Image: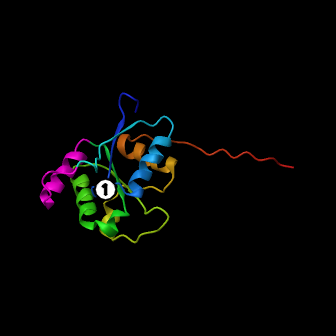
Amino acid sequence: MSQRDPIRVFVTHAWELSDDYQRVFEYLESARNFYYRNCSNPDQHPVDKSVEGLREELRQQIAPTEVVVALSSLFATHRDLLQFQLHYAKASDKPVVLMPGFGRELVLPREVGELADMRASWDERALVDAIRRQARHEDTTRWDTIEFKIE
């Protein structure tokens, strides 16, 4: 992964910029030496507003990606769209990183959890590591160093 070859990321959406959607990109932007290209575009509303029109636009956004970041917060309000995006990602052999609701634990049905290849917490490092691992199979063996004084 480099500036010339960024990881292509799709974040699930329902044609709106939710707080969790924007928070994902705040985390990705704050990560050092992490280059990505956002393939999701919730601002690009399809001309065909039918269910199939919405799905076709989502297919086009998901197709070029290397990894899908699924926001579980969409389940409460846009269950069908979230499930479609996850099923299409799996059918297209795209890995899925599932994010819990920020600041709250949502109970998701088993079938949604089973579509995820990995779960990540709301932590910049955990999210970036999960994306790297799933998109490019990069193992990030980072360690926390704690300094303390023995007296």
Using residue 104 as the reference point, say whether residue 70 is left or right of it. left
Q: Residue at x 15, y 52 (%)?
A: 56
Using residue 56 as the reference point, say whether residue 97 is left or right of it. right
Which region is colored magenta? 45-64
Residue 3 image point, x, y percent: 40, 29
The number of numbered badges drawn on the structure is 1
Residue 91 makes an appearance in the image: yes
Residue 140 image point, x, y percent: 49, 41
Image quadrant in which the N terminus is located: top left
Rendering quarter of residue 64: top left
Which residue in the structure is indicated by mark 1? 16
Comparing 16 with 68, the one in front is 16
Rendering quarter of residue 107: bottom left
Q: Amino acid at mark 1?
A: Glu
Q: Is residue 31 magenta?
A: no
Q: Residue at x 42, y 47 (%)?
A: 25
Category of crowding for the residue at label 1, using alpha-carbon neighbours closer than 10 angstroms: few (below 14), some (14–19), many (at least 20): few
Give the overall secondary structure of the magenta segment: helix
Residue farthest along the top direction in this orientation: 4
Residue 129 makes an appearance in the image: no
